[in-house]
């Protein structure tokens, strides 16, 4: 690159103009490059923070120990100068402080964009009913209450009891069916499986 050329890494930098104050009415400010407008905001916020700190029990004694010109003029200007010069990852101090605040208030563990318990937390789940799997050739004794659908893979003989509200089935063979039979239970209906 030649010495008379300036490398611009992003067009955003070209159009990110900082507002500055160069004069107040007819009086020109004695600062070569003017005063940034956000620096004035930082000074006002620092002065407000000092006034609020003066009313606190412990900090109030320290604040009131300073002479008034230092307390009300020099300290806010020094804080504003430091915050104006501070840039964290290219961001101004107020933007970096906002990002830090969002980070501190955000949940530490997230699952599906919602807060969740950290890894290793033991959670109690609801009661789980465990039934034998398809590897055995015998239906186990049990009772199912609808609404649900039950797939029977072995031949069974059934009886209706209590006006069709209860179905009692018994396994008749250990030879599995080529295609199982599905029993649909309505709300409140009971399927009772009895052993052979």
Image (cartoon, grey):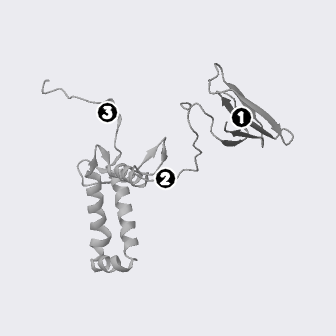
Spot occupied by residue 149 in the image (x, y as percentages of width and height): 70, 33
User: Image height check: is 24 above or below 171?
Assistant: below
Q: Nearer the viewer, mark 1 or mark 3?
A: 1
The mark closer to the camera, 1 or 2, is 1
Kindly identify the residue that appears in the image at 58 percent across and 50 percent down: 127
Q: Position of residue 114 (x, y in %)?
A: 50, 46
| Distance between mark 3 and mark 2 Cα atoms | 53 Å
Image quadrant where residue 101 sits: bottom left
How far apart are the two marked residues, 1 and 3, measured between alpha carbons? Answer: 83 Å
Q: Around disc 3, counting alpha carbons within 10 Å, would you say few (fewer than 14), some (14 to 19), or many (20 or more)?
A: few
In the figure, 19 relative to 45: above or below?
A: above
Contact between marks 1 and 2 (CB within 8 A): the answer is: no
SS at badge 1: strand
Image height of 61 relative to 181, above or below: below
Ranked by sequence position, the earlier of labels 1 and 2 is 2
Of label 3 and label 2, which has the lower sequence position? 3
Residue ranking furthest to the left? 3
Name the residue beneath numbered marker 3.
14
Relative depth, front residue between 23 and 133: 133
Q: Are marks 3 and 2 in contact (CB under 8 Å)?
A: no
Q: Is residue 28 left or right of 5 when viewed as pictured?
A: right
Disc number for residue 170: 1
Q: Position of residue 182 (x, y in %)?
A: 70, 27
For the residues carrying marks 3 and 2, which lies nearer the camera in this image? 2
Q: Residue at x 36, y 45 (%)?
A: 19
Q: Is 22 displayed left or right of 133 in the figure?
A: left
The residue located at (75%, 30%) in the rendering is 157
- Element assignment for label 2: loop
Return the mark for residue 123: 2
Judged from this view, the residue extending furthest toward the right is: 163
> Could you say where residue 31 lies in the image, as x and y percent from the top left?
24, 53
| Position of 116 relative to 192 (above/below) | below
């Amino acid at each position: 690159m030649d010495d008379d050329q300036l490398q611009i890494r992003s067009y955003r930098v070209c159009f990110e103009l900082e507002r500055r104050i160069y004069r107040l009415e007819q009086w020109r400010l004695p600062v070569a490059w003017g005063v940034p407008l956000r620096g004035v905001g930082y000074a006002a916020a620092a002065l407000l923070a000092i006034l609020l700190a003066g009313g606190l029990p412990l900090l109030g004694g320290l604040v009131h120990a300073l002479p008034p010109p230092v307390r009300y003029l020099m300290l806010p200007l020094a804080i504003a100068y430091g915050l104006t010069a501070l840039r964290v990852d290219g961001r101004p101090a107020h933007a970096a402080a906002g990002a830090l605040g969002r980070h501190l208030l955000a949940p530490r563990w997230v699952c599906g964009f919602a807060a969740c318990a950290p890894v290793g937390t033991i959670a109690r789940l609801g009661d789980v009913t465990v039934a034998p799997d398809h590897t055995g050739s015998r239906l186990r004794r049990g009772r199912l209450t609808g609404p649900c659908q039950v797939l029977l893979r072995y031949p069974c003989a059934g009886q209706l009891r209590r006006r069709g509200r209860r179905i009692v089935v018994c396994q008749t063979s250990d030879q599995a069916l080529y295609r199982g039979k599905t029993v649909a239970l309505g709300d409140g209906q009971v399927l009772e499986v009895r052993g052979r």
